[in-house]
Amino acid sequence: MTVVGPFFGLSVRDQALEADVQAGLAAVEEGLIEATKSGVPFITEAAQHLVKAGGKRFRPLLVTLAAQFGDPYAPGVVPSAVVVELTHLATLYHDDVMDEADVRRGVPSANVNWGNSVAVLTGDFLFSRASRILADLGPEAVRIQAEAFERLVTGQILETAGPQNGRDPIEHYLDVLAGKTGSLVAVAGRYGAMMSGADEHVVEILTHYGERLGIAFQLADDVLDIASDSHESGKTPGTDLREGIPTLPVLHLRARAAATGDPEDLELCRMLEGDLGDDALHAEVLRRLRAHPALEQARRDTIRYAEEARATLAPLPECSAKTALEELCDAVVHRAG
């Protein structure tokens, strides 16, 4: 049993699959470095800031595993994985500006190093490099990316706007995650299968799998934002709380408070509306949330989405790649504790 790459705890028991995955991820890493080079040294430094900080390479890993259902050595597999990761990295630069984040992947965020304008423009630079690679992968690949990017941006806008009057905030939030996170993970599954020449029904299965897994992945991040320290998550705990972003544990808390009228829950909700830039208040809110049933409910929701992702794999033939995809579901759940 061998742990694959920088991803959190995925193990591969088939040596041939392990070799393919390791070679694929190494090629993706080379592709990321090449794609983030510029004739302007400062742009190269900023563009490679998060690439060199590392990361789980969750999306390229999914591309590589999905490609096992066709020809994993097909020429479009690695470039499509680079496209997906570049797109993801670009959104991180933009997210950190929106969230005023100080830390990303255990290093100072780009906006802290160079300011908001450079961080936003660097994200745009990464989008442009992803588009250049896509142009060589054909119009269908471009269309898929464009549709996913529209969903991603729509999800971000809906998160910023909040739910419309009368809409369940939890239902709204899960729709946001399907667009903001699930769409790009779905593309990873789709590209891997499609570029490898897998059958169309396999492409559809791995697309749906990716979307459900992507939602579970983000829900695990919601749990980590509250439950972990910066060493585990690679970013400052409670960042979403400070920025007033209502992640799933907070939404469950609010729903519980509204349903029961529990005084302690109502007090915690009021604290969340306070100035969480105050370190003492922020620490107290984190402490209370870590002990609150709302956090456990968010963990259960994470498990539910991971199990839904696993269930979509049922029609696929039994093989080492399918087993590895099932273990990805377990790994996401493990992150959430």
Image (cartoon, helix red, strand yellow):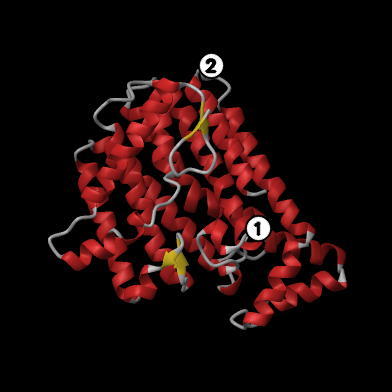
Q: Does 136 sit above or below residue 194?
A: below
Q: Residue 64: where, in percent of width, then height?
A: 38, 32
Name the secondary structure under disc 1.
helix
Q: Residue at x 79, y 76 (%)?
A: 267
Q: Nearer the viewer, residue 221 or 190?
A: 221
Residue 241 in sight from this viewpoint:
yes
Q: Residue 146: where, in percent of width, then height?
A: 33, 47
Nearer the N terminus, badge 1 or badge 2?
Answer: 1
| Label placed on residue 248 | 1
Q: Residues within 10 Å of mark 2 (few under 14, many from 20)?
A: few
Left or right of residue 52: residue 285: right
Q: Residue 34: where, in percent of width, then height?
A: 21, 49
Q: Residues within 10 Å of mark 1 (few under 14, many from 20)?
A: many
Question: In the picture, residue 255 is in which quadrant?
Answer: bottom right
Q: Residue 117: where, in percent of width, then height?
A: 31, 74
Q: Nearer the viewer, residue 68 or 176?
A: 68
| Label placed on residue 318 | 2
Q: Residue at x 55, y 47 (%)?
A: 217
Cα–Cα gap, marks 1 and 2:
34 Å
Q: Residue at x 87, y 69 (%)?
A: 262
Left or right of residue 289: residue 30: left
**The disc labelled 1 sits on which kind of residue?**
Leu
Q: Nearer the viewer, mark 1 or mark 2?
A: 2
| Label placed on residue 121 | none
**The disc labelled 2 sits on which kind of residue?**
Glu
Question: In the picture, residue 247 is in which quadrant?
Answer: bottom right
